[in-house]
Amino acid sequence: MIVWEAHACLPLHPQADFAPIDRLRAAGVNYVSINIGMDMNPLSQVMSVIGGFRARIAEHPERYVLASGVDDVESAVTEGRLAIGFDLEGAMPLLDQPEMVALYRDLGVRQMHFAYNRNNSVAGGCHDAEQGLTPLGRRMVAAVNEAGVLMDCSHTGRRASLDIMAASTQPVIFSHSNPLALVEHGRNVTDEQIRACAATGGVVCVSGVSMFVGSREPTVDHVARHAAYVAELAGVEHAGIGLDISFIQPGVDDTPPGAFDAGYWWPRSAGYDRALQRSTYPPIDSWRVLSTALQATGMTPHEAALVMGGNMARVARSVWR
Ligand SMILES: [Zn+2]
């Protein structure tokens, strides 16, 4: 079984401590996608984070490997190492240049979405006025397909996500999004979006973030219930896990430099309270028992293994280059 964590966050700082990532490895995770920047982060910060994280990975080849393909993930499973890829949350660090997609890929970025909660020149965000994919956005989708990077629709607005899924020639994922039918929140996705994702051959990975699973103290059972909803609606081949744990580290300040308005990116009107600082998550050790919790929803061990990572490995194998 491959255990695939589709999205996790360290402080966006080159000196971020990788201890939480090693805890994921100890918890049995085989692949993790780590965020290296969002629309609010200037290019200087994004590049410094990529440089720092690549160095952390290179310092411990016995623990980590920067994955360039699913073969690296499968080797990591047998070697007890953790394969890592990076993800970009928003198109603003692409500077309106589609050719930047391949550059990020060469630096280790394996998945990206186009809007972080707010609208930009490429696509609409989930906490903004409805806006579809722009003409530039269509070229960006083609660039992501061409570069062999996973197209991700989390944080994207409903209209834009449907446009992206219609335009993409490759399977599209939601790396950390939960069903709106279970919890009413602007970051959660409609049944229409979940079905459209499945129609591309993609996977909806559910998060464990308190406000998105609708519990102050999220547990493995909340996560399993959300994954089971996706599986029932769209098919078990289209459900996955992206807990989206933010490993905040005291003393490591990753506030974007310059004028920064947290209330713009995480609007209070959308239910955010002092950004995501008060979010809680299931414990990392959840990974050990998540498969059991999935089976408690009625899945067979094989189906649970697909949700734990088999589905994301299938999609990555067909998309990554
Ligand atoms: Zn996110």
Image (cartoon, rainbow, N blue to C red):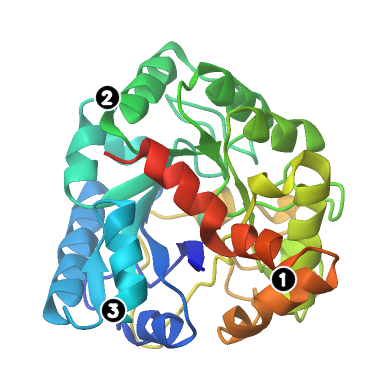
Kindly report the distance in space between the C-alpha atoms of the residues bearing marks 3 and 1.
Answer: 33 Å
Q: Could one spot residue 48 in this view of the protein?
A: yes
Q: Can you tell which mark lies on residue 98? A: 2
Q: Can you tell which mark lies on residue 79? A: 3
> Would you place residue 96 above or below residue 14 in this image?
above
| Other-residue count near label 2 (Cα within 10 Å), few / some / many at <14 / 14–19 / ≥20 | some
Locate residue 68, reporting x and y percent. Answer: 24, 52
The C terminus is located in which quarter?
Answer: top left
**Residue tagged by mark 1?**
210
| Other-residue count near label 1 (Cα within 10 Å), few / some / many at <14 / 14–19 / ≥20 | some
Locate residue 223, reporting x and y percent. Answer: 73, 68
Mark 3 or mark 2: name the one nearer the start of the chain: 3
- SS category of the residue bearing label 1: helix
Which mark lies nearer to you, 3 or 2? 3
Kindly report the distance in space between the C-alpha atoms of the residues bearing marks 2 and 1.
Answer: 35 Å
Kind of residue at disc 3: Glu
